[in-house]
Amino acid sequence: MTELIFSYLPVILLIILMTKRNNMPSYQALPLCAFIVYLLLIAVFQFELNLIHAKLISGALTALTPISIIAGAIFLFRCMEITGALDTIKAWLNTISSHPVAQLMIIGWAFAFLIEGVSGFGTPAAIAAPILFSLGFPALKVAIFCLIMNTIPVTFGAVGTPMWFGLSLVPISQETLSGIAFSSALLNTFAAPFVVIAGLMFVVDSYKTIIKNLLFILLSVFSCTLPFLLISYYSLEFPSLIGGLLGLILTVVFAKFSIGLEKPDEEQTPSGLARVSIGQLTKASFPIWGTVLLLSLTRIDAIGLKALLQLTEPSLIIELGVLGEFAISASLVLSLSNIFNTGEVWSHSLLYVPSILPFFLIGYLTMQWFQPEKLKVALIDTSNKMLMPSVALVGALIFVNLMMAGGLSSPVNKIGLNLADLSQQHWGMLASFLGALGSFFSGSATISNLSFGTIQFSIAEQLSLNTNKILALQSVGAAMGNMVCINNIVAVSAILGLKNMDGEILKRTAIVVLLYGILVGVAANVLLT
């Protein structure tokens, strides 16, 4: 019981510190809570010091992944601002539709859906948020909206990784996994309209706006989710990618012809809109289509670049004593193995993680194409914005790693098992929240599924529940946890230049997670047998 109480303590403390009236900024709250977990693992859980220190080091090093992604996204956004590319894109979007709901659904929903299917890693919000901000939407509202939108497609994520790899440790057949994938897509397709409307409620001027444009919103939602559902029956890799592509095309068409959109008053209709030629749009949108193209080339297995960028065979090995063995591969995969002789391993794929490729490379090429003399300005702006987010992310990843230390004896695992024990036969209503808890800590639906998939399977068997249903809820929960994940909140805040608003964002997205979880819990009992 003592260990269980102290398992909950750091999580509760973190939430209180970040969401109280005079909230503590994340770059202070996260390192503080990480230090508290460190002390608890020593004094209460009595784990071996080598294990604790190995987790601490691997957590700090793991922070390199989100830090590099955020830096790349900020750099690309600044390049688009400095060169005027964003102004041209805004002008083009206004020729498609100046309606705010249309712009939100095109960029924040359909385009982000497509990017999730290509890349994952939190990339959709990193690209969509600054574009929406540049269109005039308030930064805080954009952050909340983009976090909420980047949930439904995360169930399959980048070429199905959360599904086929995330659930790879669960003792099920390929046929069973396919059934779980379809069930997960079905639950998300059912929940999607409610989730999207909840997201829009945070950013549009009133609920009446949503009601007046409800047909367009639903058409856009189902343009993504119905292909997403159909493809999930045949493939684990492409539901989000194909759903996003078809959904983006159809949403642009619906917006262009104002299908389901409220007709604006004459005095509110912009006049004299500058016409953007195909050539101008192609050049200005290079940062976007170049990013998508490069992501696609490096993510689709059949092309062959993905395997090359992830080669792990060491080309250089450096012995660091008790710190472990540091290695660099030909494709610049960095790794540190056997940290403090515990078997703990850290690795970072320098060229595969979406930072150098595509963000920094595309940003650099954008500057060379438009204004090469201002490259230094973009780099300085990026570095200036990265200090506090970097501190927060190092604290977050150390906190996460320490909370997950100890395997079955870890604080996170104790929390999950306690929730299952309390709910018993009603576990179906809470299963998605365990998946969300995994994403809250790890920042990854894949890691949530890897961490909790086998636990969910075991709980379902012990309670004589439908294992497929529970695993589908785990997958959906791992996706919905994306919107409350501290890593993602810090990332979007940094990209938009928001300061000390992480707690406010967490409070608001947590409400949607609660409703989302209840909704899919009820839907699972009705739709899944």
Image (cartoon, grey):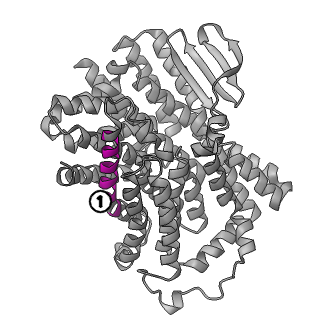
The residue sitting at the bottom extreme is 266
Residue 24, visible in the rendered structure: no
User: 49 or 107, which lies in front?
Assistant: 107
Q: Is residue 296 left or right of residue 168?
A: right
Q: Is residue 529 left or right of residue 148?
A: left
User: Measuring 40% from the left and 25% from the top, which residue is drawn there?
Assistant: 404
Q: Which residues are magenta?
A: 176-193
Determine which residue is flagged by label 1. Answer: 190
Q: 50 or 29: which is nearer to us?
A: 50
Going 34% across and 52% down the picture, which residue do you hit?
A: 185
Residue at horizontal 50 percent and vertical 46 percent from the top: 159
Q: Position of residue 377 (x, y in %)?
A: 78, 51
Does 512 sit above or below residue 23?
A: below
Based on the displayed image, in which of its 4 quarters is residue 5 positioned? Answer: top left
Question: Element type at marker 1?
Answer: helix
Please indicate, yes or no, whether residue 149 appears anywhere in the rendered image.
yes
Measured as percent of width and height from the top left, residue 337 is found at 58, 17
Q: Main secondary structure of the magenta part?
A: helix
Q: Is residue 265 inside the magenta stretch?
A: no
Q: Position of residue 102 (x, y in %)?
A: 49, 73
User: Relative to 242, does residue 266 appear above or below in the rendering?
Assistant: below
- From what the image shows, is residue 406 above or below residue 292? above
Q: Using residue 75 as the reference point, say whether residue 227 is left or right of it.
A: left
Q: Amino acid at mark 1?
A: Phe
- Along the viewing direction, whichever of 301 and 135 lies nearer the viewer: 301
Q: Is residue 413 left or right of residue 96?
A: left
Q: Classify 10 Å Cα crowding around label 1: few (below 14), some (14-19), many (20 and above).
A: some
Residue shown at 69%/69% (left/top)? 87
Q: Is residue 187 magenta?
A: yes
The image quadrant that residue 128 belongs to is: bottom right
- Point out the image quarter for the N terminus: top left
Residue 393: x and y in percent read 54, 36
